[in-house]
Amino acid sequence: MTKTALITGASRGLGAALATLLAPEFHVIAVAKTTGALEELDDAIQAKGGHATLAPMDITVDEAMQQLCRGIFDRWGKLDLWMHTAVHAAPLAPAGHIGGGDLKKSISVNITATQRLIGYVGPLLGQTGQAVFFDDPRAGGQFFGAYGATKAAQTALAKSWQAESQKTGPKVSVLSPAPMATATRARFYPGEDRDALTSCTDEAARLWAKLTDQ
């Protein structure tokens, strides 16, 4: 029976690279807001002989996430893997000048939606499934107030769940990706030498190897 993998934030960057890597071993359930990017991902997965279910949804919409998880349960009964790469990277700004809208969206995507998804996806993973999160060391860095604080909070939620699930499952992992040549990083570091950065494809392979070696 084909295993199932839910990738939240699957339309680009590390999420898309992981989704492509996992096919065809897993049936990929790809969640992102951008329909066109999801369709491109589906083409890449099919080219590998894999299959995907595209879910063009906003993870901050509670009703949509309830519908998604109920649909997964009705079709497959469970999940084997959840990889959460979805994140809102607010524009860089001094701590005292962060826009209210940017902070609100950062909290909604990076903290509130993550906490809700843990509650919804956890039962689908059960005792034997695995959830994977990705941290970022930039909390406390100059001008990274909105992104850094909310990303650190997301990681804290994941680590709390990890500690709480050690004896009962699911297995929860928090990985540290190397700097990658993503569009988000290009906004954070304009003019950076991107040739010195890791490709998302290579980093996805490294992280997956680390997970499977555990």
Image (cartoon, grey):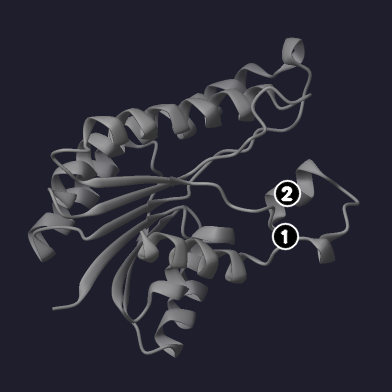
Q: Of residues 155 and 107, which is closer to you in this image?
A: 155
Q: How far across and down, in percent of the image, does residue 135 sit?
A: 53, 40
Visible residue check, residue 157? yes
> In percent of the image, x 77 and y 24: which residue is there?
93
Of the residues shown, which amino acid type is indicated by label 1?
Ala
Q: SS of the residue at dot 1?
A: loop
65 displayed left or right of 214 = left
Q: State if disc 1 and disc 2 touch (CB < 8 Å).
A: yes
Visible residue check, residue 105? no
Q: How far across and down, in percent of the image, does residue 98 sit?
A: 70, 18
Give the crowd class for mark 1: few <14, some 14-19, many >=20 residues within 10 Å. some
Residue linked to disc 2:
185
Q: Looking at the figure, which quarter contains the N terminus? A: bottom left
Residue linked to disc 1:
181
Quarter of the rendering containing residue 64: top left
Q: Of residues 172 and 73, which is closer to you in this image?
A: 172
